[in-house]
Every structure is written in C-alpha cells, then in structure tokens.
Amino acid sequence: MYKDYSVEKLEELRKELTAEYEAYKAKGLHLDMSRGKPAPEQLDLTIDMLTHCLDGDYKSENGIDCRNYGVLDGIPEAKELMMSMLGVSENEIIVGGNSSLQLMYDTIARAMLLGVLGGDKPWSKNEKVKFLCPAPGYDRHFAICESIGIEMITVPYKADGPDMDMVEKLVSEDEEIKGIWCVPMYSNPTGITYSDEVVKRFANLSPKAKDFRIFWDNAYCIHHLTDTPDKLLNVLEEAKKNGKEDMIFMFTSTSKISFPGGGIACIGASAANINFIKSQMTYQTIGYDKLNQLRHAKFFKNADGLKAHMLKHRAIIGPKFDVVLNMLDKEIKPLGIADWHKPNGGYFVSFNGLEGTAKRIVALCKEAGVVLTDAGATYPYKNDPKDNNIRIAPTFPTVSELTTAMEIFCVSVKLASVEKLLAK
C-alpha cells in the first residue's frame, strides 16, 4: 500500500508514473466520460419506434386522436406503461413530455410561484427556501436549486441511503426546509439503493413545514445490471400507511430506455396532489406530445416489454461496467488509495480517492484527453468538502475506448495520490 512506502520509494514511483502518464498524453486522445449518456447502440434498439410504430393509426385505445389538442395527464396506454415503473395507480400519475428533469423543475417553479397542496402560501413568499441535498448526488438537482435561489443543505450518504437521523432532525426543526432530493434506486452517482428502513423513515417524516415535499427521482428503477437486482420499497404506499402520502412527488422517464431527447416522463403522487397539480398545469399546457406517448405504448406494450428491452441494454453496457470495476480492482484496490461501490444497476460508478485529489485527477485526465464530470459537481455549490469524489460514467464510450480511458484514469489516480502523500 502506498501509505507504507518510504519517501524515497514514493519519489521513484512518481518519476515512473509521470513517464507513463506523459506517454498516454502524447497520443492526443479525445475520450468523453463526462455524462451518463446511452451509447448509439442503445439508441438503435428503439429506432423502429420512429419508423414503423404508428403505421397510420393515431388513435389511443379510448378513441382519442393523438394528433390533436387535449388530454392533459396522458393517454391511458402511456399511463399504464409508466404506472408499472413507478408503482402507482391511474389517478396517481401525469405523463408529461420527454424529460423528468423538466417536470421536476416545473414542479418546483409552480411551488415557488403558486404553492403546493396544503400550503398556506407560495414557497417564494417565505424569507428563505431550503432543500436538503444528499451528496454525492445528481448535479442537475443542485443546479435547479441554485438557479432559483433555493438554499441547499448537504446531507451525507451512509451505506443504505442518506443519513436519516440528520434528515429527521433538520426537517422537524426548520420550517424553511421545503424539500429534499432523492435518487432512491442505483443512486446517481453512488449506485446505492435505499434500504427498507430508510424508505419507511422517509414515508414517516414529520416536517415542521406542512408544505414540505420529498422529490423522489426514481430514474434508474428498471436499469438493472445483474440477475439479482436491488429492490426498493414503494415510498408512496408506505406513506399512505402513515396518512402522509401528500408529502411524496415521484418522477421517472424513458430517457435512457428509448431516446434521451424523445422519451416520455411522468410524475406520480397522491390522487389529491395529482388533481391539484393538474389545476395548476392547465394554464401551462393543453397537453403533452400524445403521438410520442402512443409510440412508446405501442413499442413497449407493457411492463414485460420494458423488462425484456432492458435486458438488451444490459447486454450492451454490462461489459462496460465490468471494464471499469475490474480495472479498479486490479490497478487501484491493492494500493489502499481509494474505494468505490459496485452498483447492481444505474449509470455510474462513484469513486472516492484520497482526500484532496479529485480535482487533480480530473485535471490530469483532461490533459491526457479523457473528459470526466468536473470534480465537486456531485455536491451542492460544486463544493466537495473532501475533494475526493469522482463520478465515472461508463456507458457512452466503446469498450475499447473505455479500456484506454480507464488506463489513463488509473495512472492519474496513482500519480495524484503519490503527489498527495509526498506533500504530507
């Protein structure tokens, strides 16, 4: 292990690693692992949706002409498809456009401007609005808050989800805390799935703010990588047991199932919440893209169709996760300079190096032609207090490109770690 090396041995190692790094740098590579994008081969899986799906039949199963105005909350067959993903009933869902991120943004914007069910005023009428942000987490969640002026409070992750002792304490004491971000299954970027206990504690929160909401972004709920996938309790059903179902907003989409720019997204919530949201949304849109909803329903057909399709995705991206994890196990694990979680699904591997090395590793990789998510991006205000977390996104590059990128990543980790140990 590096920590056991003498200064002399570390100096010698730094020279060897620098030479190895410079050799990679001289190749002039251009490899991108900055975001969790599906590979072109994944997008090809649904290309028939664009060409042969409708075949001149533009009517939904209840006779609605999907080319025309109307149907604010989604056509029945699209609802049925998305209900299977979120685990909600027909009166607990709105099928929207192509982006769950847009639905989340709109939900917060409406809360700021108009308030939520049970609230006595819009969020913006409070002196401050605060959100709890489990971290490392999804950078775009944090960007929404920052863009609107919502103050973010970082909550650390534990092995089974966010630190619930901290969450329960904060929401019970501070009326300005109006929400919390959650990616409960194969979390971005940690890959952790919330335990049953964590879900039950979320479902039984007693916030001081009566207009507090849990934003449950279940983006990876069917993105499994193994034959023994993680299981997640249904937070809405658990909340119903406590009479607290109005506290939950659930989101998911087909962005990484069909097309990131042309999928369908949905919000799930209590029937009362859905009716309230629709009363606000009616001024925003007459209805989302029903033709796209119809395409998805005809292509996937049902929950079994979705599951079968995701096995095809797994066949493409599973080997890429194997490249990342096998190389980390071989090149980094014996050195005692980092740790990471082996996810059973999702789109990321969360890497934790030595404290104070993440920015240096990302910079070294960039200089050698490998673009990663910026260090710090997985924390509110881009402030990783330990400067040690890096989000690895394996899905977009080819296996060959990914292998080279991971070679450069591992050399950069070693070099940055040796530099840090010598600096001490």
Image (cartoon, rainbow, N blue to C red):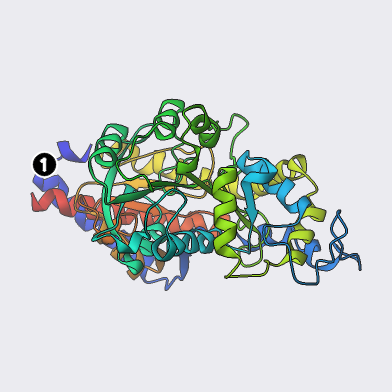
Q: Would residue 61 be found to the left or right of residue 14 on screen? A: right
Q: Going 20% across and 55% down the picture, which residue do you hit?
A: 14
Q: Would residue 214 be found to the left or right of residue 411 on screen? A: right
Give the camera-side residue of 138 and 397.
138
Position of the N terminus by quadrant: top left
Q: Going 50% across and 53% down the picture, which residue do you hit?
A: 394
Q: Residues within 10 Å of mark 1 (few under 14, many from 20)?
A: few
| Residue that sits furthest to the front in the current view | 120
Image coords of residue 244 (percent x, y)? 46, 35
Q: Would residue 88 be found to the left or right of residue 243 on screen? A: right
> Based on the displayed image, in which of its 4 quarters is residue 127 positioned?
bottom left
> Based on the displayed image, in which of its 4 quarters is residue 61 positioned?
bottom right
Give the camera-side residue of 125 and 145.
125
From this viewpoint, is residue 135 visible? Answer: no
Give the camera-side residue of 290 and 284.
284
* Label 1 secondary element: loop
Say how many tags the image has: 1
Q: Amino acid at mark 1?
A: Ser
Pointer 1: what residue? 6
Q: Going 68% across and 67% down the picture, which residue do you hit?
A: 287
Image coords of residue 124 (percent x, y)? 33, 64
Q: Is residue 112 above or below residue 378?
A: below
Q: Going 30% across and 52% down the picture, which residue do you hit?
A: 413
Q: Is residue 361 above or below residue 179?
A: below
Image coords of residue 176 (percent x, y)? 27, 51
Image coords of residue 343 (percent x, y)? 48, 39
> Based on the displayed image, in which of its 4 quarters is residue 204 positioned?
top left
